[in-house]
Image (cartoon, rainbow, N blue to C red):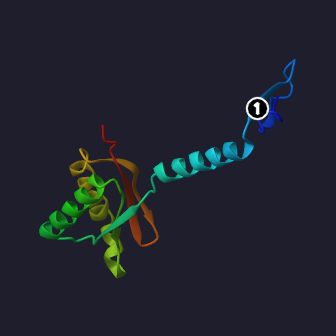
């Protein structure tokens, strides 16, 4: 039957009794599969990570300015990496840095979810915030 229709006989389930076969144009089948893979790849979202840097003694105006940037990044759907950079002897103010990051987290609650709480890594105290899913 496949030769009469000038198509290919493709075995679908070999272990079934009797074996299941289908008459299709195999090249078209491969083309459709490739097309579906490409569509799925195009729909997959790429994760963008934006960074915001603070100092342990960041002033209120600078903090507000950077917080507005953070709101913009999260509303665009990017992840946020906020960190306090301790330079020289400013490492003595670890508590100030942690308070600053926790304050940022509470103010950004409606835009994002804290993925990782503030953690000291070398001279940086890092915190990750992921955007909330849009409905």
* Residue at x-position 23% and y-position 54%: 103
Towards the viewer: 116 or 86 = 116
Residue sticking out furthest to the bottom: 88
Residue 29 x %, y %: 68, 42
Above or below: residue 10 compared with residue 40: above
Q: Residue furthest top?
A: 17
Residue farthest along the left direction in this orientation: 61
Determine the residue positioned at 58% across, 49% down: 35
Residue bearing mark 1:
23
* Residue drawn at x 31%, y 41% as measured from the top left: 134
Residue toward you, 27 or 54: 27
Residue 89 location, quadrant:
bottom left
**Residue occupying the point 80% across, 35% down:** 10
Lateral position of residue 58 relative to residue 51, left or right: left
Quadrant containing the C terminus is top left
Tell me where residue 54 appears, x and y as whole percent: 28, 70
In front of the other: 11 or 112: 11
Q: Nearer the viewer, residue 59 or 65?
A: 65
Quarter of the figure with the N terminus: top right
Label 1 crowd bin: few (<14), some (14–19), many (20+), radius 10 Å: some
Label count reads 1
**Up-down relation of residue 82 to residue 106 (above or below):** below
- Please tell me whether residue 4 is drawn above or below residue 110 in the rendered image: above
Estimate the x, y position of residue 15 in percent, counting from the top left. Answer: 86, 25
Is 91 above or below relative to 35?
below
Question: Mark 1: which secondary structure?
Answer: strand
């Amino acid at each position: 039957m496949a030769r009469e229709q000038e198509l290919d006989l493709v075995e679908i389930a070999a272990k079934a009794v009797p074996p299941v076969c289908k008459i299709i144009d195999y090249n078209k089948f491969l083309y459709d599969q490739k097309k579906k893979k490409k569509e799925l790849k195009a729909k997959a979202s790429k994760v963008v990570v934006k960074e915001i840097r603070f100092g342990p003694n960041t002033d209120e105006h600078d903090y507000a300015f950077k917080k507005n940037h953070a709101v913009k990044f999260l509303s665009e759907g990017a992840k946020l990496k906020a960190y306090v950079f301790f330079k020289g002897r400013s490492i003595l103010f670890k508590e100030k840095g942690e308070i600053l990051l926790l304050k940022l987290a509470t103010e950004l609650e409606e835009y994002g979810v804290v993925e990782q709480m503030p953690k000291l890594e070398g001279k940086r105290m890092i915190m990750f915030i992921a955007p909330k899913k849009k409905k």
